[in-house]
Image: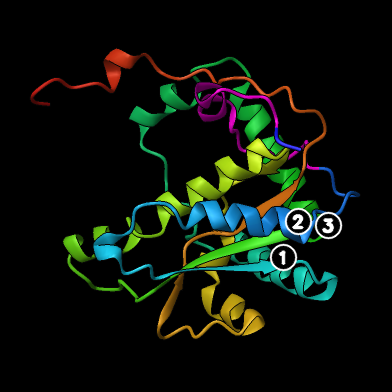
Amino acid sequence: MALDLSSDQLLSTTRAVRHRLDLARPVARELLAQCVDLAVQAPTGRNRQRWHFVIVTDPERRAALADAWRAGVSAPGTSPAIPERDIPRMNVEPGVMDRVFSGATHLYEHLHEVPALVVPCVEGRTEGAAVVHQAGTWGSILPAVWSFMLAARARGLGTCWTSGNVANEKEAARILGIPFGEVMQAALIPVAHTVGADFRPAKRIPREQVLHWDRW
């Protein structure tokens, strides 16, 4: 059943859910299919529609994919150093990073238990490509993934953008049968019913720090 949310509420309360994923409750295939139907209504460069969504619900394959994801998360060099200028932004709310790290640890330990793991992909690879080509490729999958996540929230499902599989992409591709040479993975999205639905807008840095009129 869809949640009674306005469009503004949907946009402002679709959070990265980790602790509050219900690991014991299956997600109906039809709900996931509905989310994909809405996802592919997103804009796509030149209407090429190069998107794909690999949805993994089989327990053994989920476990194998979760292991590949953990290996990517743990691999040296996969977490770039954070510039000092970003530290105040990250800590805009007291205790927020403690909650983020706690949630990340929880997801690391329980990813294989999440009922559905969604791997959005896009045809074409961007290694060594010009920025304009990269922008066109990523711009043809990222809006669709966000639409998927919004559709999931509207149906009482929680999601979280993660990228450990991208750091270990060849192994994840092998597990899922994705043709690595022709198709890029964009993320790994855990999907589950949420424990409660009372999510709130996040504390963000002031508008004045991000909004530019006419020039930088």
The region drawn magenta spans 3-21
User: Would you call the spot at circle 3 few (<14 residues within 10 Å), some (14-19), or many (20 or more)?
Assistant: many
Q: Residue at x 50, y 86 (%)?
A: 179
User: Of the residues under marks 2 and 1, which one precedes in the sequence?
Assistant: 1
Q: Residue at x 39, y 71 (%)?
A: 50
Q: Mark 3 near mark 2, Cβ–Cβ under 8 Å?
A: yes
Q: At which x and y percent is residue 180? A: 47, 83
Q: Mark 1 near mark 3, Cβ–Cβ under 8 Å?
A: no
Label 1 belongs to which residue?
A: 66
Which SS class for mark 1?
helix
Q: Mark 2 near mark 1, Cβ–Cβ under 8 Å?
A: yes
- Is 18 within the magenta? yes
Which SS class for mark 3?
helix
Label 2 belongs to which residue?
A: 111
Q: Residue at x 42, y 53 (%)?
A: 142
User: Which quadrant, please, contains the C terminus?
Assistant: top left
Gap between marks 1 and 3 measured at Cα: 9 Å
Q: Is residue 163 above or below residue 98?
A: below
- Is 174 within the magenta? no
Label 3 belongs to which residue?
A: 113
Gap between marks 2 and 1 measured at Cα: 6 Å
Q: Is residue 113 above or below residue 88?
A: below
Q: Amino acid at mark 3?
A: Glu
Q: Is residue 40 visible?
A: yes
Q: Is 42 positioned to the left or the right of 65 in the image?
A: left
Q: Is residue 145 above or below residue 178?
A: above
Residue nearest the observer in this picture, 45 or 107: 45
Q: Is 136 positioned to the left or the right of 56 in the image?
A: left
Residue found at the very far left of the displayed protein? 215
Gap between marks 3 and 2 measured at Cα: 5 Å
